[in-house]
Every structure is written in C-alpha cells, then in structure tokens.
Amino acid sequence: MTDQPKGDYYDDPSQVQAYIESRQSGLSRNELVEEPAFLALLAPVPLQDRACLDLGCGFGHYSSILAKRGGVVTATDRSALMLAAAHTSRPHERIHYEQVAMEDVTFPAATFDVVISNMALHYLADLAAMVNKIAGWTKPGGTFILTVEHPIFTAARETPLGIWQDDTTQTEWIVTRYFALGPRQGPFGRHYHHTFQEYITTLLSAGFVLQALVEPQPSAEALRLNPNLMQDIHRPVFLGFRCLRVPEQ
Ligand SMILES: C[S@@+](CC[C@H](N)C(=O)[O-])C[C@H]1O[C@@H](n2cnc3c(N)ncnc32)[C@H](O)[C@@H]1O
C-alpha cells in the first residue's frame, strides 16, 4: 500500500498543472539545480539498449532522457494525472508507463541495468524496504541513481510554502528535529524525513556501493536566471547518489 493519502498533491489537477508548468518554465529549482546534478550522475552510465526503471516517474521527464539515450524504460508512478501528462508530453516508443504505487511494484530479480528515482523516495515511510527491493531488481554491476529532498531541508516539522518563495539572503536556516524520523507536511504533500546516515546505511546494507554523492548548489547562471535561488547557497535542498549494485563474487 502507498504511504500517500488519497487526495494528495499529485491527485489534484490544479496543483499538478501548476507543478508541471513550473517544471517546464526554465526557471524552476528542479531544472536549474537538481537536473544538472542528476545528469552529471547519469553521464558515465551506459544506456544504449539497457533495461531501465524510473520509479515515481511523474510526467516522464527523466524517463524520456533515458529513452532518448537508448534505454528501454519501464516508468511507474502512482498519480494518474502525472502519468496522463507523461503520455501526452513525453511519449516514446521505448517507454512503457504504468500507474502503480512503487510499494506495490514487483519485478523478477536482476531485471534492470539502470534504476532511477528522482525526488520520489522521500514520499516513503519505509525507505529500507523499498531500497532492498530495488537492489533485488538491479542486475549485479547495474546502477541505481536517486535524488531526494536533502535531510537538512526535510528535518523541520513543516516546510512552509513561504520558504520556496523567500528570496532573502538573510534568512537563518535552523535545523531542528533532525533525528526525529517520520512524516512532514510540505508544499508537495506529505513526505518523510530520513537522515543522511539512514540514506547511506540503507543503500550500503541493501548491497549497493556508493560511487558518487552530490549536494548541488545553484550555478552563477542559475542565480542569474532565478535570483530566488539565492536561498540555496545557504543550505542544500537536494541530495543525489549514484550507486553500483555489488557484482556477484
Ligand atoms: C516531485 S515528483 C518527481 C517526478 C519525477 N521523478 C521527476 O523528477 O520529474 C514526485 C513523484 O513521485 C510520485 N510518487 C509519490 N509517492 C509515490 C509512490 N508511493 N509510488 C509511486 N509514485 C509516487 C508522485 O506521484 C510524483 O509524480
């Protein structure tokens, strides 16, 4: 069963429309900060004819990047609205979209060469259960790339909408409740706070080796395009990993 309550952010047509418009504005934090970090993590990964899985694919933006680079992509998301947008705006002969909560997905062992999950795993209460499944679905020697909201960013009890719009460089970003794991209410629905240690130990315990880790900051060009991102020079919003599934001995 999914951890997201029905009637959540990604089930609301006006919220989803606003989200997708923002994600295609050329000015969003995802486009200017998260996507360059993800592309850098992806750069060394062979994709031609590789079996790929995109968990929490949303409107298919990253699935389509994998497909355009030769990947054969299974892309899943629990939101019918996001998948409808994916079918419309990111169709590709090598992408198969499927509506299913990632907690309910099943695949045979060692199905995929590459698994990605961008900005979706922080919606799960039981991170370890999901990462263990992903490790099982990934071929030995395969790659798992994930980006999530940074634990420093998710620690606070609530993520008020205002902080996304606050362009001041004077705000003090105080980290509280860092070790209190669990749900938080944010601008994009209920998400779950996991610590940095939890992400790392969960990945290692599942049988992944950490190859690369990134806490991306906005570039000078990103700051020129969107000065609101000045707040992101004070604390990280995103965290990304590239992991290798340990080959069989
Ligand atoms: C911030 S969006 C990211 C979408 C896409 N990965 C991207 O980066 O463009 C988060 C997505 O995760 C999906 N999601 C949240 N919880 C999920 C779950 N339990 N199973 C599958 N998808 C989920 C939402 O429906 C939404 O499309």
Image (cartoon, rainbow, N blue to C red):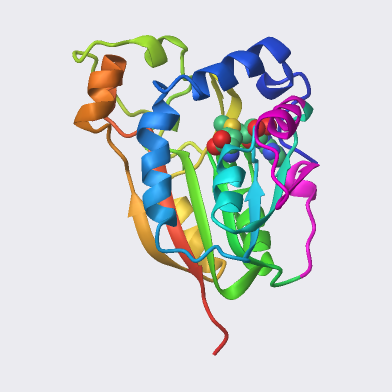
Q: Where does the image place residue 189, in percent across and percent down from the top left?
A: 61, 22
What residue do we see at 41% from left, 48% from top?
A: 39
Q: Left or right: 72 with respect to 97?
A: left
Numbered range of the magenta stretch: 81-108
The answer to which quarter of the image holds residue 14 is top right
What residue do we see at 26% from left, 16% from top?
A: 227
What residue do we see at 36% from left, 59% from top?
A: 212
Up/down of 189 relative to 165, above or below: below
Up/down of 94 relative to 226, above or below: below
Q: State how many labels appear.
A: 0
Residue 105 lies in magenta, yes or no?
yes
Report the quarter where the C terminus lies: bottom right
Residue 70 lies in magenta, yes or no?
no
Q: Quadrant of ligand 1?
A: top right
154 or 18, nearer to the observer: 18
Q: Left or right: 116 with respect to 159?
A: right
Q: Left or right: 114 with respect to 96?
A: left
What residue do we see at 73% from left, 49% from top?
A: 93
